[in-house]
Image (spheres, grey):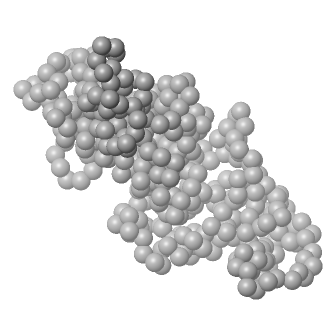
Amino acid sequence: MRARLPAFQSWEPPTNPGQLITAGWHHSAGNGPPEYGYSATLTVAARTRPVLGSFPQLALGLVLDTPHKRIGANAITTLKPLAALGFPAAFAVVDRAYTDQQPGHFAQPARELGYKLALDYKVDQRGVQGSAHGALLIDGSLACPLMPDRLAQATTGLNDAAIRTPSQELTALITAREPYLLRLKQNANAGGAIRLQCPAAGTSPSLTCPRFDRLHQRGPTRPTAVDLTDARQRAAHLAAKPRALPPQPDLKAGELPKICRQHSITLSKDDLGHLDKFRQDLPYLSPAWIATYKSVRANTEGINGRVKGHDLDLGEPKNRLAHGRVAQNLLTALLVTVANDHFLDQWRHTRQPPDEPATPADTPQNPAEPFDGTPPAGQSRPPPTP
């Protein structure tokens, strides 16, 4: 998350070309005027599964820099200490500014730290984005080259409003894509390469493909009895799965893409080139993607509003009167730390059950004073371990 930090109001941007400029103009989305100042990159703790418990909304990392500079690198700078501290690495959910970064600046280092990616795209980036080993890169997922064009192009040219509130037709098309997506067979090795399997291969294929059957000499399966009252048995039968339709006449074996000649392919981090920045770990606009992306983005925007709307008001230049990047870094770090302390204190008070017995940390230290079991004001048990 990046937050605008306007410069002190009485200070004008330097006009001397020889003078060192560490701030800059921040152009945000929309038609609002730009602001001169710094840009703060904040890494925010978020959870998408509330059944596992809850934890306070906190900023865990901060980097202050010139707006629109080193966006991906600054995010990685905030993530590295978390990995060293042993914090769990699940999904890195980011806005479209990070999707535009070169793979070596954000996507690949984030994966090396153990994070999966949940990304969004600009209008001209949606749909078919490229290919590797014959598999199509469609909205960040590699898919069978025989995916029907209507499904592959389902998001092509759609504006942001159509993506934020998908229609029933779009939702149906996104669901129909899933059987054609390559399946992860082996997680990334030390070099960052992963193994992906053809959706028609394996003991539980998600679709049937005459091309696969012809090349790999898969004969007709023996008929098996199916309990038609069992929904799982009906869905697992090959007759219920989509069927890929190769062109007629089909290509010769030597002309087919690698994904069709083999059961699986190895995708290295350089196979997609600069398009690797689009690759993500959840099917775009699928229920899993929506549940992850929207909840985490709401969390990050929420802390942005809390930090700027808090009585500390990080976005108020008068609260950061000192000039220069070093001074601004220190003041911003102090403000965020104090804000975190306030958020943690509020969370502890709202989350502790009223009949919760006091912890040893809550016990008065003065033995001369009697203790009736009531926690002192402003104190409560520590947050649960995630």
Residue 138, x across and y down, in percent: 57, 61
Q: Quadrant of residue 338?
A: top left
Lateral position of residue 157 relative to residue 310, left or right: right
Q: Residue at x 47, y 58 (%)?
A: 291
* In this view, 285 is above or below 273: below
On the image, the x and y values in percent for residue 79 come to 48, 31
- Residue 352: which quarter of the image? top left
Image height check: is 20 above or below 312? above
Check the image and report above or below for 331 versus 313: above
Figure disc tally: 0
Q: Picture coordinates of residue 70 (x, y %)?
A: 40, 31
Q: Nearer the viewer, residue 274 or 377?
A: 377
Residue at 81 percent of width and 63 percent of height = 201
Percent of width and height locating residue 296: 42, 49
Q: Residue at x 27, y 22 (%)?
A: 334
Taking the image as shown, residue 384 lies to the left or right of residue 279, namely left
* Residue 370 in sight in this render: yes
121 relative position to 249: left or right: left
Question: Which residue is painted at 10% across and 25% down in the image?
Answer: 11
Looking at the rendering, in which quadrant would you find the N terminus? top left
Residue furthest out toward the bottom: 228
Q: Quadrant of residue 255?
A: bottom right
Residue 214 sits above or below residue 356 on the image: below
Question: Which of these two is toward me, 236 or 215?
Answer: 236
The reply to whether residue 22 is in sight is: no
